Image (cartoon, rainbow, N blue to C red):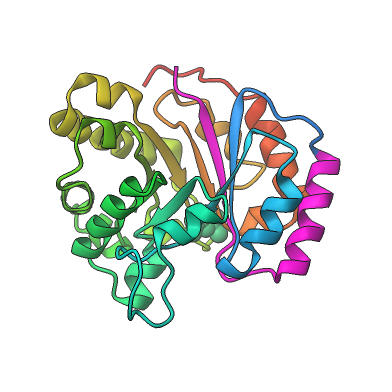
Amino acid sequence: MRTRFIVGNWKMNKTATEAVDFAHRLTQELPSVEGIQVGFTPPFTALHATRGALASNPAFLLGAQNLHWEEKGAFTGEVSGPMLKDLGCEFVLVGHSERRQYFGEQDTWTNRKVLAALRHGLMPILCVGETLQERDSEHTDAVIERQLRAGLAGVDGPGLAAVTIAYEPVWAIGTGRAATPQQAVPVHRKIRSIVGELGGPDAARRLRILYGGSVTPKNIADFLSCEEIDGALVGGACLDPLSFATLIKVAIGSHPTTAS
Ligand code: PGA
């Protein structure tokens, strides 16, 4: 049984002071969280403050939005795995579409980042997803396969067991136009089968695959009603503590109802 995982991707939002306020208001709304895991990815500058404010709940995991693959050195502006680990991070996003789109992140880089995260005891959440043009031209499967095989190159069995994948169609991110579960599930299946080819049936069975792209408190239950969808990567709806708390409460009460 895969533990469901809801991750709030803060992107470039919230100062450290705002993060502490957010964390206090969220924990008031959610005194206990059981049965699922909840992740937070504040900007680097708010990681320390957020950890302090959320430390009370073991279901809460701290993560970062990016990392560099080297441990240290002359890479101005970059942050490494050991630095994140030292701050209490347990996971890190890799290859988010905004990194690919605005910062030229390539599959070779996502691969180095996945490997670096694993080396330093951080769970990578590798983000994959097609653009609208790629979907319309029926290239979704090919794009996902390329991003996945390239991103996971050289990851061994124990490594695969520590990886989470987020399927985030680019056209659904920040647009208010979420994919339907009927659109997402076949892609989740494809991802699981590719990981099965890479690491065998056990790796495929254990793999957590999150959906991301305009997830809200209103549609989260629809996604989690699908057995193939193990959680969500949430952007806009994670920034307000009330909205995120509502989303988490709905997630806790949601169970798969459709065989997929
Ligand atoms: P969104 O962002 O929920 O605002 O669409 C999701 C993401 O970018 O991870």
Tell me residue 108's x, y (percent): 18, 62
Q: Quadrant of residue 55?
A: top right
Which portion, as a residue range, is magenta?
1-29
Residue 192 in picture, x, y percent from top left:
26, 31
Q: Is residue 165 magenta?
A: no
Quadrant of the rendered image containing residue 249: top right
Of residue 139 and residue 200, the one placed in the foreground of this image is 200
Vertical arrangement, residue 237 with respect to residue 79, above or below: above
Answer left or right for 4 relative to 250: left
Q: Is residue 62 left or right of residue 241?
A: left
Q: In what quadrant of the picture does the C terminus appear? A: top left
Q: Residue at x 21, y 46 (%)?
A: 152
Quadrant of the image occupied by residue 211: top left
Q: Is residue 177 visible?
A: no
Residue in front for this viewpoint, 122 or 249: 122
Image height of 183 relative to 225, above or below: below
Question: Residue at point 43% right, 54% down?
Answer: 93
Could you tell me which residue is drawn at 32 percent across and 68 percent down? 100
Residue 26 is a magenta residue = yes
Left or right position of 111 against 244 = left
Give the quadrant of the N terminus.
top left
Q: Viewer-proximal residue, 186 or 160?
A: 160
- Place of residue 12 in the rendered image (x, y in percent of width and height, measured from the top left): 57, 71
- Res. 194 visible in picture: yes
User: Which residue shows up at 65% across the image and 54% down it?
Assistant: 237
| Side of 149 where 171 appears, left or right | right
